[in-house]
Image (spheres, helix red, strand yellow):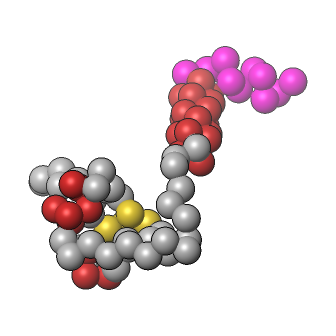
Amino acid sequence: MRMLRDLRGGAGLLVLGAALGGGGFLLLDSFREAVPASQSVYYTSCRDALLDDRTNIRRGEPGYRAALDADGDGFACEPYRGR
């Protein structure tokens, strides 16, 4: 009962919205087309990956290599967002 009362406040709704939004993102991301692990993919540059319609290549996925992961966060060929 107390939880429902807390959710009526603005902060509770904000937390609830963030949780639902994050869950929705994870659900949609899980439907992303997977590349079969047996398929070997090598991109010489992120430009080649982009031409193959691949960005944000995760560590462990075919096509990922550390040389394409500029900031070392586990995602190769991320779109540049500037500062």
Q: Residue at x 51, y 49 (%)?
A: 33
- Give left or right: position of 37 versus 65: right
Q: Residue at x 68, y 24 (%)?
A: 7
- Give left or right: position of 60 versus 8: left
Q: Residue 26: in sight, yes or no? A: no
Decide whether residue 63 is among the magenta residues.
no
Q: Is residue 74 above or below residue 27?
A: below
- Give left or right: position of 43 versus 8: left
Q: In the current view of this chain or complex, which residue is farthest to the top?
A: 8
Front-lying residue, 68 or 11: 68
Decide whether residue 9 is among the magenta residues.
yes
Task: Label the magenta part by its dominant secondary structure.
Answer: helix
Q: In the current view of this chain or complex, which residue is farthest to the bottom?
A: 66
Region rendered in magenta:
1-11
Which corner quadrant of the image does residue 40 belong to? bottom left
Q: Residue at x 27, y 72 (%)?
A: 43
Instruction: Name the quarter where the C terminus is drawn.
Output: bottom left
Percent position of residue 63, x then y? 37, 71
Q: Is residue 8 above or below residue 36?
A: above
Front-lying residue, 67 or 6: 67
Which corner quadrant of the image does residue 41 belong to? bottom left
Percent position of residue 60, x then y? 50, 75
Q: Residue at x 49, y 71 (%)?
A: 39
Q: In the current view of this chain or complex, which residue is farthest to the right?
A: 1
Q: Is residue 2 above or below residue 80?
A: above
